[in-house]
Image: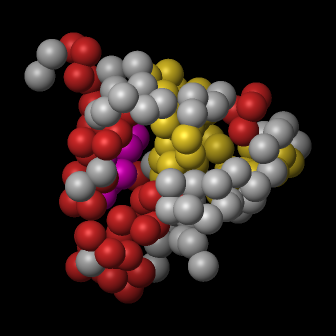
Amino acid sequence: MTSHDTDTIAGTLAADGRFSLMAQAVRAAGLDTVLAGKGPFTVCAPTDEAFRLLPAATLAALESDPQGQLLRVLQYHILFGNLPCSTIKKLNFPKTRLGITVEITEAGGVVVFGGAPVTLPDIACTNGVIHGIGRVVIPR
């Protein structure tokens, strides 16, 4: 793997120990090639702690259906464009890669993506940006 590959969103998720479960999920759902591609994308990526907050049954259901439920959930965490926190907090209801909108608000200086606080903002990548979030957001 060249150093350039590791600078993409997919490469950064795989290399950053705080996102190992997200990186696994992205690979299982087949989104790693997308997130290593041109973009630009903004990924609100649940941290490993966020994945651990999911009920075991929910996590098991997602893992058992990587091309279905898991792919849906992950696509809900992807926005189009290279959007720093200073921009996404003004968007309110941007459309996700899943094709439905997500609510973004700001509370006490913290950007909140679909009810999940952004805990690791603005991790720059060659094809976009990652914002680490404290919860996995399940689309309705």
**Relative image position of residue 18 (x, y in whole percent):** 39, 40
Image-quadrant location for residue 79: top right
Along the line of sight, the residue nearer the viewer: 132 or 114 = 114
**Residue reaching furthest to the top:** 3
Q: Is residue 63 above or below residue 4?
A: below
**Residue reaching furthest to the right:** 108
Measuring 40% from the left and 19% from the top, which residue is drawn there?
126
Measuring 83% from the left and 46% from the top, which residue is drawn there?
106
Image-quadrant location for residue 65: bottom left
Q: For this view, does 96 lie left or right of residue 88?
A: left
**Relative image position of residue 130 (x, y in whole percent):** 50, 35
Residue range (magenta): 17-25
Along the line of sight, the residue nearer the viewer: 48 or 23 = 23
Query: Is 114 one of the magenta-colored residues?
Result: no
Instruction: State which quarter of the image contains the C terminus.
Output: bottom right
**Relative image position of residue 24 (x, y in whole percent):** 25, 53
Instruction: State which quarter of the image contains the N terminus.
Output: top left
Q: Is residue 27 visible?
A: yes
Query: Is 21 one of the magenta-colored residues?
Result: yes
Q: Is residue 138 above or below residue 50?
A: below
What color scheme is it? secondary structure
